Amino acid sequence: DEHPDDDLGLATKTRPKTAKPPMYKVMLLNDDYTPMEFVVMVLERYFGISSTQAYELMMTVHKKGLAVVGVFSFEIAETKVMQVMDAARKHEHPLQCTMEKE
Ligand code: TYC
């Protein structure tokens, strides 16, 4: 049986105490030289973003200086950064892609 003072009826939220892995934001940085079409291609190819969304996101980076293009586990984020940096290097574009813990 329930003692009258036991439950004040306040809604509380508890989180199951499971280890949740840290997530990493992958960001694209603006520069003056990388062609817009190349950035759009990178977003489509390596981040699976549709061409219209990729164009919008590229323009956000172009205007704001940088934008988060995705959030991933460490290993996936690291791979995305490497793929973008490799493609930029291969085409001799100064495009920069970085990751940061959320
Ligand atoms: N600023 C570049 C231009 O005018 C385009 C660009 C967009 C470059 C996004 C990098 O992450 C970038 N050609």
Image (spheres, grey):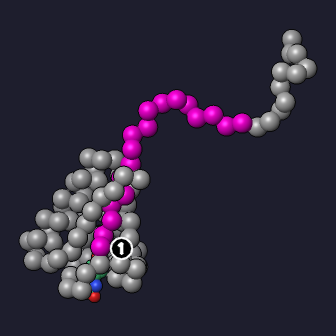
Q: Is residue 83 left or right of residue 98?
A: left
Looking at this view, is 27 or 50 the one in front? 27
Q: Is residue 35 visible?
A: no
Quarter of the figure that contains the N terminus: top right
As for residue 23 lying within the magenta part, the answer is: yes
- Count of numbered marks: 1
Label 1 crowd bin: few (<14), some (14–19), many (20+), radius 10 Å: some
Q: Please provide the residue range marked out in magenta.
A: 12-29
**In the image, what residue occupies the spot 58% across and 35% down?**
15
Identify the residue under disc 1: 66
**Image: 30 above or below 49:** below
- Residue 81 percent coordinates (x, y): 23, 60
Looking at this view, is 74 or 55 the one in front? 74
Q: Is residue 34 left or right of residue 66?
A: left
For ligand 1, tell me if the residue under mark 1 lies within 8 Å: yes
Decide whether the magenta segment is chiefly helix, strand or loop. loop
